Amino acid sequence: MNNYQRDLNCIKASFKADWEEKPIIHIYAVATKKACDDLQELVNKEKPMKPLEPETHPLAMGMANFGYIKYTCPHCHKKEQAFYSGDDIQSYCSDCGQRLDWGKEK
């Protein structure tokens, strides 16, 4: 569990009783639950996922190990491309922000 998940779990636990047991603050509880759901989505996107269908396309520009990879994001399923140079490659989907685990794809 990463720090984001730990902190979010703490917030959820502190408001859980309010969501379930105190109807007088229902509006605030609903807003808080929505905020926690949104934060949970961000926390989930921080867990690296392997890109789907990666295709490496080296470029001949006088630089060794330079090019781009076409892939499908495992979260939003959009076709994307990421440029790389050496071991440096984009770590997140440029559309949805999902953290990517390239492993040994290049």
Image (cartoon, rainbow, N blue to C red):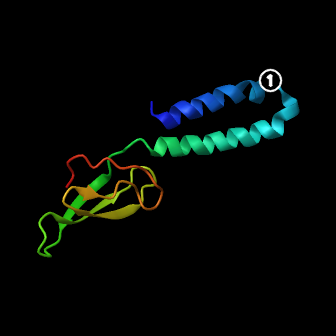
Please identify the quarter of the rendering in which residue 83 is found: bottom left
The answer to which of 68 and 11 lies nearer the viewer is: 11
Q: In this view, which residue lies farthest toward the right? A: 24
Secondary element under disc 1, as helix, strand or loop, is helix
Q: Is residue 13 above or below residue 28?
A: above
Q: Is residue 72 above or below residue 49?
A: below
- Mark 1, other Cα within 10 Å: few <14 / some 14–19 / many ≥20: few
Q: In this view, which residue lies farthest toward the bottom? A: 61
Q: Can you give x and y, in whole percent of width and height, for residue 23 in the image?
A: 85, 30
Please identify the quarter of the rendering in which residue 22 is found: top right
Q: Can you give x and y, in whole percent of width and height, for residue 72 in the image?
A: 35, 57
Instruction: Please count the marks in the image.
Output: 1
- Quadrant placement of the C terminus: bottom left
**On the rendered structure, is 2 left or right of 102?**
right
Q: Is residue 12 above or below residue 63?
A: above
- Quadrant placement of the N terminus: top left
Check disc 1 and report the residue beneath it: 21
Identify the residue at image location x=48%, y=56%: 96
**On the rendered structure, is 80 left or right of 32?**
left
Identify the residue at image location x=75%, y=30%: 19
Identify the residue at image location x=27%, y=49%: 102
Please identify the quarter of the rendering in which residue 78 is found: bottom left
Q: Can you give x and y, in whole percent of width and height, for residue 76 in the image?
A: 46, 54
Q: Can you give x and y, in whole percent of width and height, for residue 57 in the image?
A: 20, 66
**On the rendered structure, is 55 left or right of 7?**
left
Amino acid type, callout 1: Glu
